[in-house]
Image: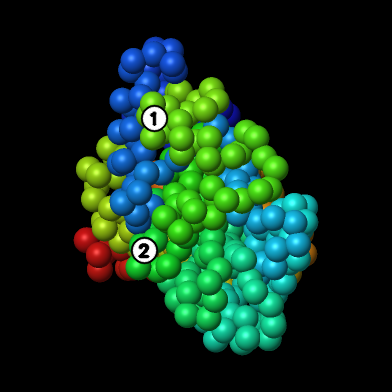
Amino acid sequence: MLIDQKFLFTPGPTPIPDRIQHAMNHPMIAHRGNDFPKILEEVSSRLSPIFGTENPVYLIAASGTSALETAVVNTVEENDEVIVIVTGVFGDRFANICEAFGANVHRLNVEWGETCSPEQLELFIKSINKKIKAVFATYCETSTGVLNPVNQLGKVTKDLTDALFIVDGVSCIGAVPIDMNGWDIDILVSGSQKALMLPPGLAFIAMSTKARKVIKNCKAKRFYLDLNRYIESYEKEKSTPFTPAVSLIYGALEVCRMIEEEGFVQVIQRHQLLKTMVREGLKALELPLLTSDEDASPTVTAVVTHNEKTRQIKKTLEEKFNIVVAGGQKKLKGEIFRIGHMGYCTPFDVLKILNSIEMTLHQLGNHNALGTATTRAQEVWIKHV
């Protein structure tokens, strides 16, 4: 085996296409020169359809978590009443960020592995006899592999409150349908190292007109993550208020080209196919899945490690086959492993990970595993060819 070759199937960071690597090797330019504004404007406008908006997408040199914090610190003031839908680790992170900035957080806790239904949110909102400033939701909960119905949750929020509806799309934007205006989303954030096929280091923020008004009037203290600075800098100079990640932005431009060449509808369909192949293959191996098919994300699948042998799968995959998957987080640590299948991922890649799981299970004593998952996944794929 090639000892320097690893195969990345984590839900972030994800593999980076060669052409994006090449784009990021573009000679450095002065970010206050004449060329950078043209590149930033092009990237911002070409990202807009991927974020389901006609408004610009703003870029910050920072992590996905910084995108969550940006959404909070620009809208929430101390003692504001907010609702955070918690379906896993990253919903919990949204709540923790809100609490760190002094908000009164009402957590709508949902069983991990399940989505939040619009009925749950409706009952929760009606149970709180206070004016709500914002409702925070996670589109794809990376820690469990569920895809929350944010289109329905946004409608409930709009129908029952005047609150902003703020969505974490870090682990799915670029792979799923999204319509900010039609789904009543006021702020949508994402990060570079997931379905958008880039290294970590870029945060993306899209906003509605309503959100911009709230952000402009928000009195919370902030500096680097102050969106007013980014809006003003972009509108006046097509630039950023602070040093941008120039190489990553060149890469982001290539991401837009790749998505446009494949067609965004086709990108979404590919991720649905990858999801079905993974899930059906794992079911054929009788490996339990954390989420139902209806709740499952097209970008990440969580597999329950229900006995001592299946708890060895993650370790054996890396040690024997150089396949890297992710483990569980917080209360799911040691209870699941997670397979990322987003961004630069094809059906052939799915066959690779399923074949490796088959061989792993064979080595762990399941001598009926070989060919089981891959055959089932091929049957799913051939129907789409």
Residue corresponding to mark 1: 236
Q: Residue at x 59, y 39 (%)?
A: 226
Which element carries disc 1, helix, strand or loop? helix
Q: Would you place residue 153 above or below residue 9 in this image?
A: below
The answer to which of marks 1 and 2 sits earlier in the sequence is 2
Quadrant in which the C terminus appears: bottom left
Q: Residue at x 75, y 66 (%)?
A: 104
Q: Whole-percent x and y of residue 219?
A: 66, 48
Graded by Cα atoms within 10 Å as few (under 14), some (14 to 19) or many (20 or more), the crowding at tag 2 reads some
Quadrant for residue 151, please give it.
bottom left
Q: Whole-percent x and y of residue 298?
A: 44, 62
Q: Residue at x 62, y 33 (%)?
A: 224
Disc 1 to disc 2, how far (Cα)? 25 Å
Q: How is the image coloured?
A: rainbow
Residue 19 visible from this viewpoint: yes
Q: Whole-percent x and y of residue 40?
A: 37, 30
Which element carries disc 2, helix, strand or loop? loop
Amino acid carrying label 2: it is: Asn
Q: Whole-percent x and y of residue 70?
A: 60, 46
Graded by Cα atoms within 10 Å as few (under 14), some (14 to 19) or many (20 or more), the crowding at tag 1 reads few
Q: Residue at x 46, y 39 (%)?
A: 231
Residue placed most toward the observer, 338 or 150: 150
Amino acid carrying label 1: it is: Lys
Residue placed most toward the observer, 326 or 22: 22
Residue 351 visible from this viewpoint: no
Residue corresponding to mark 2: 181
